[in-house]
Amino acid sequence: MGHRKHRTRMMIIAGCCFLLLVTGLARTEAMEVKSSYIVQFHEDVEDEEELLADVLQNVTPDFVYDQSIRGLAYSLTAEQAQAVKAVRGVTSVDAGVDYEVSLRESVPFIGADDLRSELDHRGVKLTGKGVKVGVIDTGIDYTHPDLSRNYKGGYDVVDDDDDPMESKVKGKAQTFHGTHVSGIIAANGSVKGVAPDAELYVYRALGPEGQGSTAYILDAIERAIDDGVDVLNLSLGSPINGPDWPTSTALDRATEAGIITVTSNGNSGPDLWSVGSPGTASKAISVGASTPPLKAPHLKMDGSDEHVLLQAVQGTKPWDLKRKNRVIDGGMGLPDDLDGAEGRVALIERGGIPIRAKIENAKNAGAVAVLLMNNVPGTFMAGVEEPLAFTAAAIDHKTGNQLREQIQANEDDETMMETTYIEETDHMAIFSSRGPVTQTWDIKPDVVAPGVDIDSTVPDGYLALNGTSMAAPHIAGAAALIKQAKPDWGPEQVKAAIMNTAVPLVSEDGDRYPPFVQGSGRVDIQAAVLSDTLVYPGALSFGVWDADPDLQLFQRLEKELTIENHSDEKRTYTFDVPSSIGTGLRWHLPMATTVQPGEKKNVKVRVEIEPDIIDFKRVDGLIRVNGGTEPVTLPFLLFSDEPDYPRVSAFQFGKLPGNGDWMYEVFLPGGAEELEITLYDPDTFAYIGTLDHETDLPEGPFEKRIDRNELQLKPGLYHVLVYAKLKDREDTLESKILLLESK
């Protein structure tokens, strides 16, 4: 199993208190800047440390991995990392990144309560009894009365001991996420989880503020494999949309070892391509978030019929305003920005200072509530480390700007906002990250589960939270119930049962959500347990068809399917042809296939493409398989030419400790022909300077150190524009950085 060669801590460097922090950096006595790197090796290498001895000279690894991946974690300078990449036998050198912790109604809603009368092969009720569920998170309050009976062990990777107790110290160090996740899976008290008799093994890999490094996550996966867990839940994520990131690879390896791995898809929706590792792992069950039955608060502005969903700010009071309220522009939430906030809702922009400080400043100014607007396009998941008894909600960048413009236009008259409450059930949560995965084009998420207003355990009580972090443990609990009912099923069969029986969801307008939004649909645990036909893989991605005039008239793509008959009688399965009129696709589906009880057969699904009449950039739909007790629908996806995935993501920037040099890091999913990072004045958008310009960069993370003498930045707020170009597609990523004077 993975183990630590010597004690090391991954530091988060605050520099001069930047808005965006450089993460995973450490400093040596000689002031050399080092980062965490994950080094992976070819299977023929016999002694990994010996292979690198000449290059690294007395540098010992921080972690050794032999089950989740074959690799080592080192703290290295950029120059050392480059030297390691050149060593024959090294397959990859990846910079470590930080991961974040991305029931009353939800458990019965997905069918878990309906199974309590069902029995397993021993005549025991289906409650998860005897199934070991691992949780990699911020730890667990195993003294909580709803969890104390289920907790069986684990490890604290952060503090390197065998006590994964959640941090209960008041302030920034306090965490509660892992306890909440554990409760959704297996609470057995005032709150009942999905599998209330499952055994919990918890690995604390995320420390204060719910953050942890790649090295910690990998070590926790190694320990879970060594402990022989049946199911492993990771309600965490990163912004890296790549299939071969170490955490994704490790989950695939854990699945191959027989563990049903479940991970959250991320909270960066609703944009396409927003899924992040480890949600990109092909063999894991990646879970998006849907809404259970609830009345959701929506913002309605004066003079508009549009209703905008208000996202909860985790750890604050739920939005419960009932009448029209005056709203002011509260700027960045600094005390001077909040003059006139008394008795009003304060619209505050994200960034600059911590969210908790913004809300406390508004509370002290007499505001009745806070609306947090994103400072970059799209929605975001906001939260505070310690519960705060004040009402707050979050809105997307576009809505926030519209409201701010209305406030500024009504300079002589106050702007009003109204809260309406709309009943929502079985719709996608707007924050739920979308797929597909870059490079492999895999459909993610695989399935969705309730992730909005989920009430569960936290240290010393209970709390309702939102996120795909809350959706994933519903699936982990479901997997525990299926594993109890079908102990001989492996991870692929359990995943198929969950996907094959999911309920396809439609939008408020009645349109089917595409597969890269909902996967197969919302989980139905009872149907999954009782299913007698399995078809896998549960979703089909045919990848990218690259138009080439020199190729033959018809081009063919194909995928192999496995059909398993778990009934007591012979079954004949047939396929319905998807509707593809006018797209230039011709489907060739299997003929009627007969499968004997307890047996399985492999069949092939083929699609031919007519280049002369092809008329799509992306086509998706459902393939229906008939013959089981209930039909099985398989989502499919196919691209024409280069997909329009974002060319840049995950920008970080800050000052290095010791010598004052700067460093930035970006993630380039497909590489970049050109990369440029530019600084602007945040108010006037006047050009300040170009941070860097690069060409012909490879796919994956790219980092660069900039000499302090080459870049002179004064304290203040800056608007950052990151530009990347690849294959005639240009993308930009916007952010803000706040530089405060050094003390």
Image: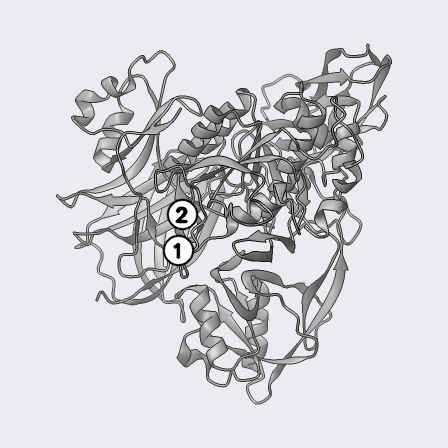
* Element carrying mark 1: loop
Q: What residue do we see at 84% from left, 23% from top? A: 628
**Nearer the observer, 90 or 557:** 90
Q: What's the amino acid at mark 1?
A: Ala
Give me the disc on residue 365. none
Do the residues bearing badges 1 and 2 touch, measured as CB atoms within 8 Å? yes
**Disc nearer the start of the sequence (1/2):** 1
| Quarter of the figure with the N terminus | top left
Classify 740 as above or below 247: below
Task: Work out whether residue 307 can be spotted.
Answer: yes
Residue 219, position as x, y percentages in the image = 40, 32
Q: Position of residue 723 (x, y in %)?
A: 41, 49
Residue at horizontal 64 percent and vertical 54 percent from the top: 455
- Three-letter amino acid code at disc 2? Gly
Whether 325 is drawn above or below 622: the answer is: below
Q: Is residue 14 left or right of residue 166?
A: left
For this orientation, the residue located farthest to the left is 30
**Nearer-the-camera pick, 161 or 307:** 161
Q: Is residue 165 left or right of residue 230?
A: left
Label 2 residue SS? loop
Q: Residues within 10 Å of mark 2 (few under 14, many from 20)?
A: many
Per the image, the residue denoted by label 1 is 173
Residue 379 seen in the current view = no
Tell me: 255 left or right of 238. right
The disc at residue 207 is 2
Question: Which residue corresponds to the image point at 47% horizontal and 43% vertical from the top-left?
Answer: 238
Q: CA distance from mark 1 to mark 2?
A: 8 Å
